[in-house]
Amino acid sequence: MTRRAGVWLWRWRRNPLRRTSDVVEAWVLLVAWILALVGGLVAGVLTASAMQASAERVRAQSHPVQAVLTQDPTHGSARPTSSALVWGTVRWTDRDGSTHTGRTRVPASAAPGSQLTVWSNGRGGLTSPPASAADTAFQSFLGGLWASAAGAGLVIGGAKLVQARLDRRRFDQWAEEWARVDARWGRKTG
């Protein structure tokens, strides 16, 4: 166990083969992992809370109203089943007493003059029913999870790019050193 930890931490130990780029790489990876964990967590929490607040705002702005179907719903070419939703024109009176007309999805079996419940945004427009609290919580959780993964992935991806650049620099340094050794020996080794 300790031997394996020593191999893993070789960049941090004093070592005659350790270069400055090895130490820089060790620090870059350490900082990247810390930023990925903390930054991913913060991004996830902020995204989830923003999504939750947005859903609460939509839920507060929309409200159900009773509407009357004014025209026979359009069915299109196929005969829909009784559970199908089709476009229909409805009229409703909003909370402020103003009367509005709009098109929304209504059951295909609804007849003109039938009462329906529709959702209004309070500005005279129809809107879809707001998501339930459970749906909002689940969507916020998923959004936070995706934001967390994306944030951590960006940080780790950036660290891998830095690591690749350091590797390229090390390979160039090794090539220069081998060229000096070859010149001293008077022959080519590679």
Image (cartoon, rainbow, N blue to C red):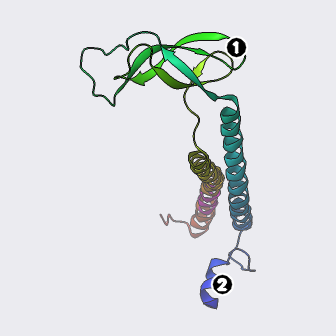
Which mark is on residue 97? 1
In the figure, residue 63 lies in which quadrant?
A: top right
Question: Which residue is more in the foreground, 27 or 83?
Answer: 83
Is residue 168 in the magenta section? yes
Q: Residue at x 69, y 67 (%)?
A: 22
Q: In this view, does 117 lie above or below 164?
A: above
Q: Give the range drawn in magenta.
A: 166-174
Q: Which amino acid does label 2 sit on?
A: Gly
Image coords of residue 90 (percent x, y): 50, 14
Mark number for residue 114? none
In this view, the residue farthest toward the left is 78
Which badge, 1 or 2, comes first in the chain's sequence? 2
The residue labelled by disc 2 is 6
The amino acid marked with disc number 1 is: Gly
Q: Identify the residue at image location x=59%, y=35%.
A: 130
Local packing at callout 1 (Cα closer than 10 Å; few below 14, some 14-19, many 20+) is few
49 in magenta = no
Q: Which one is nearer the viewer's eye here, 92 or 120?
A: 92
- Name the magenta segment's main secondary structure: helix
Determine whether the residue tagged by mark 2 lies in a helix, strand or loop. Answer: helix
Picture coordinates of residue 104 (x, y %)? Answer: 48, 19
